[in-house]
Amino acid sequence: MGTRSWAALTLAALIVAVIVVAIIRVPWTSPPAPRADQLAALGDLPADAVARGREFHAALRPGAYGGLVLGLIIALILGLTPLGARIVALMGGNWWLRVLVGGFVIVLIGEVIALPLAAWRETVLRRYGLSTQTWSTWTVDLLKGYAVAAVIGAIALLGFFGVARLAPRWWWAWVAAGAAGLVVLFSFVFPVLVEPIFNRFTPMEAGPLRSSLIALAERDGVPVRDVLVADASRRTTALNAYVSGLGPTRRIVVYDTLVRDAPPAEVEAVVAHELGHAKDADVLTGTLIGALGAAAAVCVVFLVGSWTGLLRRAGVDSVTDPRAIALLLALATLAGLASAPIQNAVSRRIEARADAHALELTQDPSSVETMEQRLATTNLADVDPPRLEYVMFASHPSVVERMAAARAFARGER
Ligand SMILES: [Zn+2]
């Protein structure tokens, strides 16, 4: 059997593994609450808040879709014409110089062209009172983001092209294993290496709220050393919380805005949702799917690498030539777009399970529902987004779905 057959076989095995993980670890059997209940919830929300959320999202939409289309066009022009290869070739003859500087320039082109849209988005956030940033803190955030992406991108690209030089026939196997390993490592170190670049995290100060949250976690059988408070208010007025990290780096983080603006019972409802994520090891599920997906993507790149028509379009002889960076980025952009609805479908089911967990743990559906309403109103959510947008981009169930689920629980139906 040749390397191509092995790569195809490995790809098939990885796809099966992703499907098995998704079947075992994602709750597919509990559908969203009936549409009639969702519409009832929608009717009970304050009409002006619903209208304001819709208006806000309508204002964001042109920039969001414009950015998506623009990003795709730039990626395709650079990757599927010889333009990208020519730009990388300008960076001298050294392979690693081509990889580092060439990769940087190719990504930078897209970023610079998208920059006005990002700035415009920030003006919308400010107009609606959601952003608390100045242009200088916004710029610092942007540059920090670029720096983090540059480091991660450099590791990934140097790894890919370096290994391809060392193992011309079997590089895909090593790179696939390395990519999967990097995803796991990244999940693990993200909360301690990357998150502190953007926010300060302080353990919640002692008091009745902290005690009640720790007690809630204990009742849930999820040992939590601390609840961390992020200084999100330096950026936004939005309310949120999340779980990140694996094993020793796992933490529950709440925004300072939530602690400041929401009553304790609602903070408890939010933390109960996050405890659901911790209990079901949802970060691990996401990491597993991400790692297997990354390895599968490497196999695809290897197999696509023998498609001479495509290589000719991109003006390269091989995908392992650093001049193929733009082609690889175009493929990654397409894969990201194509897989978004699947990733979001998985995410929505996992989020619905965490919601169900919060209801089960707190036995307080009315606080869960008022919390959903507060988050929706403060964060200017589109409480019942257009169907296509929901399927493509929603990582969470809609607000009306979440409220309907709380009401079904209150009626004893779940
Ligand atoms: Zn969640």
Image: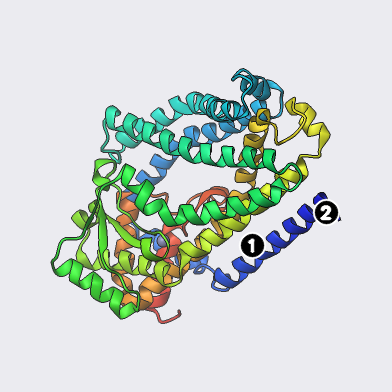
Residue 169 against residue 118 in the figure, above or below: below
Q: How is the image coloured?
A: rainbow
Say which of 353 and 47 sits in front: 353
Say which of 381 and 290 sits in front: 290
- Specify the quadrant that holds the N terminus: bottom right
Residue 276 in the figure: left or right of residue 5: left
- Specify the quadrant that holds the C terminus: bottom left
* Rendering quadrant holding ligand 1: bottom left
Say which of 50 and 196 sits in front: 196
Measured as percent of width and height from the top left, residue 93 is found at 64, 21
- Residue depth check, mark 1 versus mark 2: number of the one nearer the observer: 2
Residue at 23% x, 52% y is 256
Q: Amino acid at mark 1?
A: Val
Say which of 166 and 384 sits in front: 166
Measured as percent of width and height from the top left, residue 379 is found at 33, 49
Image quadrant in which you'd find residue 314:
top right
Residue at 58% x, 56% y is 291
Measured as percent of width and height from the top left, residue 336 is found at 60, 45
Residue 145 against residue 45 in the figure, above or below: above
Mark 1 lies on residue: 18
Residue 280 in the figure: left or right of residue 6: left
Q: Residues within 10 Å of mark 1 (few under 14, many from 20)?
A: some
Residue 86 in the figure: left or right of residue 48: right
Q: Residues within 10 Å of mark 2 (few under 14, many from 20)?
A: few
Outermost residue to the right: 1
Q: Is residue 191 visible?
A: yes
How far apart are the two marked residues, 1 and 2, measured between alpha carbons? 20 Å
Image quadrant in which you'd find residue 402:
bottom left
Mark 2 lies on residue: 5
Residue at 47% x, 65% y is 282
Q: Amino acid at mark 2?
A: Ser
